[in-house]
Image: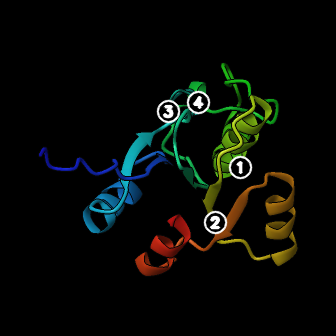
């Protein structure tokens, strides 16, 4: 009798402009979950099919301007410094909005330190299924959210 092959772990797309989140998740949660990086909307869209969920950072200030998407989900070509800063500061939301507009309904977690609870509730309602959590969320709490 052949040994039973276990199912692969659930795969989550980690949208961030660096590697801080994905390195931490792989190191501490990598036995239970698979994490794939997405540094832009294009990466996230390509990686989303079959994913168990999306994990998004809010701020993408290290991302080149040409890779940032605007409120319409369009990559910004030649944008001024103020527009670049505004788009970078909310890029996680803009990426998720663009994914939702293209039919990606996968559950998502947005790591954002929002001062206004009403804004978090609005985002969760308008971009559902979404959970907004502080960037300081612990690994145990995150693992429970991923299950």
Q: Nearer the viewer, residue 37 or 143?
A: 143
For marks 1 and 2, the one nearer the N-term is: 1
Q: Residue at x 63, y 60 (%)?
A: 110
> Which of the numbered marks, if any, corresponds to residue 34?
none
Tell which tag, 1 or 3, sits nearer the viewer.
Answer: 3
Q: Nearer the viewer, residue 75 or 124?
A: 124
The secondary element bearing badge 3 is classed as helix
Residue beneath disc 1:
93
Could you tell me how far apart the alpha carbons at marks 3 and 2 are, in whole angstroms? 22 Å
The Cα–Cα distance between marks 1 and 3, rounded to whole angstroms, is: 17 Å
Numbered circle sitting on residue 47: 3
- Of residues 93 and 4, the one nearer the viewer is 4
Disc number placed over residue 45 in the picture, else none: 4
Q: Reading the chain from its start, which is encountered first: label 1 or label 4?
A: 4
Q: Position of residue 105 (x, y in %)?
A: 71, 42
- Residue 87 in sight: no
Label 4 close to label 3 by CB (< 8 Å)? yes
Residue identified by numbered label 2: 112
Mark closer to the observer (2, 4): 4
Residue at mark 1 to residue at mark 4: CA–CA distance: 14 Å
Q: Which x, y percent locates residue 87? A: 70, 42
Q: Circle 4 — which element?
A: helix
Question: Is 147 left or right of 1, judged from the image as shown?
Answer: right
Cα gap from disc 1 to disc 2, whole angstroms:
10 Å
Decide if residue 3 is on the left or right side of residue 21: left
Q: Earlier in the sequence, mark 3 or mark 2?
A: 3
Is 28 above or below relative to 99?
below
For the residues labelled 1 and 3, say whether their Cβ atoms are less than 8 Å apart.
no
User: Mark 2 Cα within 10 Å, few/some/many (few <14, many 20+)?
Assistant: many
x 33%, y 66%: residue: 29
Q: Pick whichever, 8 or 1, lies toward us.
A: 1
Residue furthest front in the image: 1
């Amino acid at each position: 009798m052949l040994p039973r092959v276990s199912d692969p772990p659930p795969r989550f797309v980690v949208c961030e402009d660096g590697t801080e989140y994905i390195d931490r998740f792989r190191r501490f949660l990598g036995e239970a979950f698979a994490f794939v990086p997405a540094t832009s909307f294009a990466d996230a869209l390509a990686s989303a099919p079959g994913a168990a969920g999306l994990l998004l950072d809010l701020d993408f200030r290290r991302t080149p301007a040409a890779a940032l998407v605007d409120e319409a989900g369009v990559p910004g070509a030649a944008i001024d410094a103020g527009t670049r800063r505004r788009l970078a500061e909310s890029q996680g939301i803009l990426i998720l909005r663009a994914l939702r507009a293209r039919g990606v309904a996968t559950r998502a977690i947005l790591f954002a330190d929002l001062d206004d609870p009403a804004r978090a509730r609005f985002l969760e309602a308008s971009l559902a299924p979404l959970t907004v959590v502080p960037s300081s969320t612990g690994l145990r709490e995150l693992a429970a959210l991923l299950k």
